[in-house]
Image (cartoon, grey):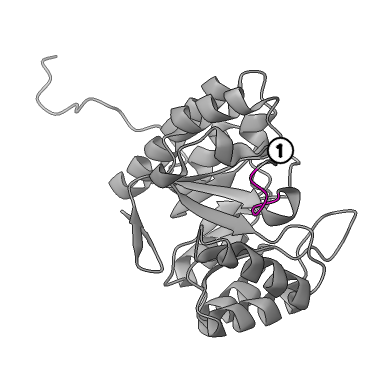
């Protein structure tokens, strides 16, 4: 079970709801993924306007925990205000803190992320901050009380996969809260690699929504999460420089 802020989940795949070609494809992809947590950008939908089309119309939200994110925020104050707006809707008490510090790379602002995380924790939120793969920053966020750490594998939407597995491993090894790899995932291979490193979960959006067949890709990502986690728990064999016979040679007749 994946436990975040006292909430328990069977699925370790968190799925974004943006950028799908249409709501029907989105719904089928969500179903195929078997996710239990859906994330959405608060600024991209009117959660108070019943006549505004959004993914809530097509998906039975009673089946999911919603994880609004503060995408679009440039400061801690903006992120906190956005999170409070989402909570006021009555839909959720979890929030993904996302504060972009560079418009070109879309990398998160570490200082503003720390400030927003601290403030939202005081407000009683379950806080999941999106960060770079900075090992020290991840530790500081956990020390503040963050309920999970969400380091990016590579820049948002780039599909580059894990570009710094060493830092990601360091973050996982030092963390006492779930580490959910977020951003830059491109394929099931990337998902499997992250889970084999010991990640507790994966959050992705573009890798599914922009795939040629989002529904098939959602299922593939689900299976990759499961395979990677099982491989991590099973413990892989050590890598060796030379070959080792698969069959024992003792007792063979000459």
Q: Position of residue 138 (x, y in %)?
A: 59, 72
Residue 85 against residue 115 in the figure, above or below: above
Q: Which residues are magenta?
A: 46-50
**Residue 227 in picture, x, y percent from top left:** 39, 36
Name the quadrant of the C terminus.
top left
Query: Does residue 180 sit above or below 23 in this rendering?
Result: below
10 Å neighbourhood of mark 1: few (<14), some, or many (≥20)?
Answer: some
**Residue 59, relative to residue 88: is it above or below?**
above
Which residue is drawn at the image coordinates 39% and 43% (left, top)? 63
> Where 74 falls versus 23 (above or below)?
below
Q: Nearer the viewer, residue 81 or 157?
A: 81
Q: Position of residue 214 (x, y in %)?
A: 60, 24
Taking 96 as reference, is 234 left or right? left
Q: Quadrant of residue 242?
A: top left
Residue at 49 percent of width and 63 percent of height? 172
> Looking at this rendering, what residue extends furthest in the top direction?
254
Residue 248 belongs to magenta span: no
Q: How many marks?
A: 1
How would you classify the magenta stretch by its main secondary structure? loop
The x and y percentages for residue 238 are 38, 46
Report the side of 245 relative to 95 (left or right): left
In terms of depth relative to the viewer, which is nearer, 181 or 83?
Answer: 83
Q: Residue at x 68, y 77 (%)?
A: 116
- Left or right: 231 in relation to 117: left
Residue 198 visible within the image: no
Residue matched to label 1: 159
For mark 1, give the secondary structure: loop
């Amino acid at each position: 079970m994946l436990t975040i802020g006292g909430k328990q989940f069977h699925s370790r795949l968190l799925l974004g709801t943006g950028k799908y070609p249409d709501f029907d494809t989105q719904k089928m992809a969500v179903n195929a993924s078997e996710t239990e947590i859906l994330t959405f950008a608060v600024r991209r939908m009117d959660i108070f306007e019943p006549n505004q089309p959004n993914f809530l119309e097509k998906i039975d939200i009673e089946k999911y925990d919603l994880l609004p994110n503060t995408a679009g925020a440039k400061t801690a104050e903006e992120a906190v205000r956005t999170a409070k707006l989402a909570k006021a809707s009555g839909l959720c008490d979890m929030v993904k803190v996302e504060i972009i510090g560079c418009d070109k790379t879309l990398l998160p602002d570490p200082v503003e992320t720390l400030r927003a995380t601290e403030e939202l924790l005081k407000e009683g939120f379950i806080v999941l901050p999106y960060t770079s793969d900075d090992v020290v920053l991840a530790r500081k966020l956990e020390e503040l009380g963050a309920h999970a750490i969400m380091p990016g594998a590579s820049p948002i939407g780039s599909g580059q996969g894990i570009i710094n597995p060493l830092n990601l491993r360091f973050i996982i090894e030092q963390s006492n809260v779930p580490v959910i790899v977020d951003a830059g995932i491109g394929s099931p291979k990337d998902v499997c690699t992250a889970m084999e490193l010991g990640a507790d979960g994966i959050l992705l959006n573009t890798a599914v929504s922009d795939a040629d067949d989002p529904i098939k890709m959602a299922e593939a990502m689900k299976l990759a999460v499961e395979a990677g986690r099982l491989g991590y728990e099973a413990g892989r064999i050590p890598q060796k420089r030379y070959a080792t016979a698969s069959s024992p040679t003792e007792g063979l007749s000459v």
